[in-house]
Image: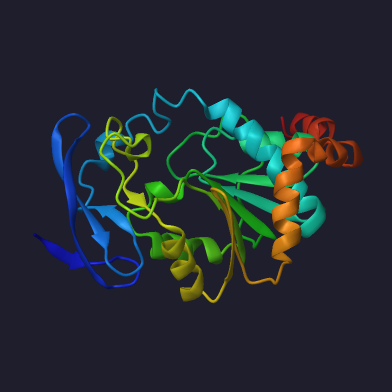
Amino acid sequence: MEQINCKICNSESSTAFEHKVLNKYDVKYFKCSSCGYLFTENPYWLNEAYKNPINISDTGIMARNIYFSKIVSVILYFCIDKSAKYLDYAGGYGIFTRLMRDIGFNFYWHDDFTTNLLARGFEKSNERYELLTAFEVFEHFSNPVEEVKKMVELSDSILFSTVTLPEDVPAKDWWYYAFEHGQHISFYSEKTLRTIAEQFGMNFYPFKNFFLMTGKKINSIKLRLLFLLAHFGLNLFVRARMKSLTEADNKKMLKLH
């Protein structure tokens, strides 16, 4: 059984299984014995995997972004500074950035691999942000610690989502492996994510498949309660009290063009 060091905690990691990726490459997956991180061998196939950054099987892209906007609007309104600047990291086509600006939150967009279609004019600048969002991004990281290092240079708070591993390595039919498109190369247990947060001296708040790493102290009970209430319409209360940026953004873009 092949063994290598974990990319996160440097502990011994051994081969968990092998499977075809992109229906053609035999790829080894390794599991860390300490922090629980599950990761592929060096992902030499990524250029091919990212020929289309948003893969064709992602039929939930709109529903997912709408759902995230409801949760995040509640958390920002009640726990963070609702008038601050925010950044959506690896923001895809700009769907989430546009949704949040339409609610009234001053969001900006950043993505190294995808074209900004819906939030043009609101790209990242060289400044720090109150909070950074990164939804369905961590599973794409080849070197999570290096990526988080880039993120904390932009903000000391990261709100993100990823589907966490159960205690045992899931069977090969687990949908989140996404062997067919080859973009998912890192998988985390809650312990893995907590380990990353500790390396950066950040507090860690888990709630289902949402996670917050932050240098701030936040009431975890309040955070969990807000997450729950966002599923029962509290986001409508927030939307009614925020001033949408849709019209102001329109006027700004008209002046630029």
Horizontal side of residue 12 vs 150, given as left or right = left
Residue 101, above or below 143? above
Image quadrant holding the N terminus, namely: bottom left
The percent position of residue 142, horizontal first and vertical second, equals 32, 54
In percent of width and height, residue 185 lies at 31, 47
Above or below for 44 versus 5 = above
- The answer to whether any part of residue 119 appears in the image is no
Which residue occupies 43% across, 30% down? 54
Q: Quadrant of residue 53?
A: top left
- Residue at image coords 80%, 35%: 233
Q: Which residue lies at the image location 28% right of the left edge and 73% below the top edge?
A: 10
Residue 108 is left or right of residue 20, and the answer is right
Q: Is residue 118 above or below residue 87?
A: above
Residue 161 versus residue 118: which sits nearer the camera? 161
**Residue 46 in the figure: left or right of residue 14:** right
The outermost residue toward the right is: 241
Q: Quadrant of residue 174?
A: top left
Could you say which is closer to the camera, residue 152 or residue 226?
Answer: 226
